[in-house]
Amino acid sequence: MNAAERMFLDQGVASTTIEQITTGAGVAKGSFYLHFDSKEDVVEGLRRRFVGRLLDAIEAAVEEQPDEDWSGKLAAWATTCGSVYAECVRLHDIVFTDVPPPTQDGLADNVLIDNLAQLLADGGAAKAWAIDDVRFTAVFLFNALHGVILDAARTGRADAIQRKIVAHCFRLVGLETA
């Protein structure tokens, strides 16, 4: 996976051969086929790994916040999500745009949205905010953040919009913005 990621980042998926991946990984071509059927399977594995790393970073940042600091937790969620997307924009483009997933279901149903929905539900239960439809709000926030941060990262403005992202998240859930 690491060798494939490096090769895809260096020369793109279409230009990378399975032989280059196996050579870069120091494994026999037969070993590749024990785990994958094609380069597209490798891309799917990289897609899952990307999302897993993003989720791990978000969960760690949210956990660092005090238990009752719901605004801190929401800000940590949004800031970390935005930062990781911005740092990994090229890899994101490779695994989600250059070789798109077979469906667009992930835009409304994925572990990141589930995690955000749980955070919003927990904050609602703690009376930090009142949200009529937690799932709708999580899908809306995730896709809005996803769109603006990727756009900003491609133009080198990701750091400049972090405060705006947090402020918009706060307004959406009814929190005061600084």
Image: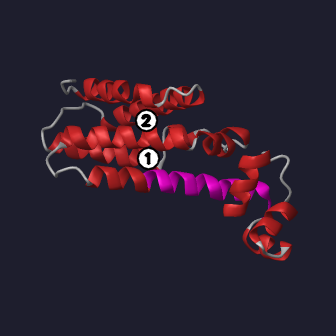
Residue 140 seen anywhere in this rendered image of the structure: yes
Which residue occupies the foreground of this view, 173 or 59?
59
Magenta span covers which residues?
A: 37-55
Within the magenta stretch, is there residue 39? yes
| Residue drawn where x is 76% and y is 75% of the image | 34
SS at circle 2: helix
Residue at numbered disc 1: 112
Give the image location of residue 6, x and y in percent.
71, 55
On screen, residue 18 above or below 121: below
| Residue drawn where x is 26% and y is 28% of the image | 170
Three-letter amino acid code at the position of disc 1: Leu
On screen, residue 156 above or below 126: above
Residue at numbered disc 2: 142
Crowd class of label 1 (few under 14; some 14 to 19; many from 20; radius 10 Å): many
Three-letter amino acid code at the position of disc 2: Phe
Residue 1 seen anywhere in this rendered image of the structure: no
SS at circle 1: helix
What is the C-alpha distance between the residues marked 2 and 1?
8 Å
